[in-house]
Amino acid sequence: MSQEKLAEAIGLTFQQVQKYERGANRIGSSRLFDLARVLDVTVAYFFEDMSSTVAAKTPSRMRGFAESKPEPFEPDPMARRETLELVRAYYRIVDPQVRKRVFELAKTLGKTRRVDA
């Protein structure tokens, strides 16, 4: 694929593609994703031939983070569908006293420890 066709497919000028190819400009993650999509490869494809000396110079390794085990990713519970549905259901309770009781119940249940059998 020519630089012109690649540039057109991702909405850039061919000069910008040349700068990426020469290493004059850095490629952002979203642009790298676009390139992978257009070229029908995975993003990992661009890193397959990375030498160990280059890989060792990544910021995370230079700061010593690569040696430590990363914390497991826990998604924000406020972004979960279940949370949104719960909040919507809660606010559909018309009686303020009932709503307050449900709120207190949820707080109490949230404090109890789970005992796995």
Image: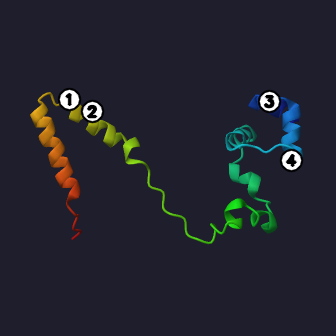
Q: CA distance from mark 2 to mark 4?
A: 50 Å
User: Which image quadrant is residue 61 in?
Assistant: bottom right
Q: What is the quadrant of the C terminus in the image?
A: bottom left
- Provide residue 27's location: percent of width, then percent of height: 76, 43
User: Dot 4 lies on which element?
Assistant: loop
- Provide residue 9's location: percent of width, then percent of height: 76, 30
Say whether disc 4 or disc 3 marks the residue closer to the N-terminus. 3
Q: Answer yes or no: do the residues labelled 1 and 3 have beta carbons within 8 Å?
A: no
Q: Residue at x 75, y 41 (%)?
A: 39
Say whether disc 1 or disc 4 marks the residue closer to the N-terminus. 4
Colouring rule applied to residues? rainbow
Which residue corresponds to mark 1? Answer: 92
- Provide residue 41's location: percent of width, then percent of height: 71, 46
Which residue corresponds to mark 4? Answer: 23
User: Dot 1 lies on which element?
Assistant: loop
Which numbered dot is residue 12?
Answer: 3
- Provide residue 94's location: percent of width, then percent of height: 14, 27
Q: Residue at x 62, y 66 (%)?
A: 65
Name which residue type carries label 3. Answer: Leu
Q: Residues within 10 Å of mark 3 (few under 14, many from 20)?
A: some
Q: CA distance from mark 4 to mark 3?
A: 16 Å
Q: CA distance from mark 2 to mark 1?
A: 6 Å
Name which residue type carries label 4. Answer: Gly
Name which residue type carries label 1. Answer: Arg
Q: Residues within 10 Å of mark 2 (few under 14, many from 20)?
A: few
Say whether disc 2 or disc 4 marks the residue closer to the N-terminus. 4
Which residue corresponds to mark 2? Answer: 88
Q: Nearer the viewer, mark 3 or mark 2?
A: 2
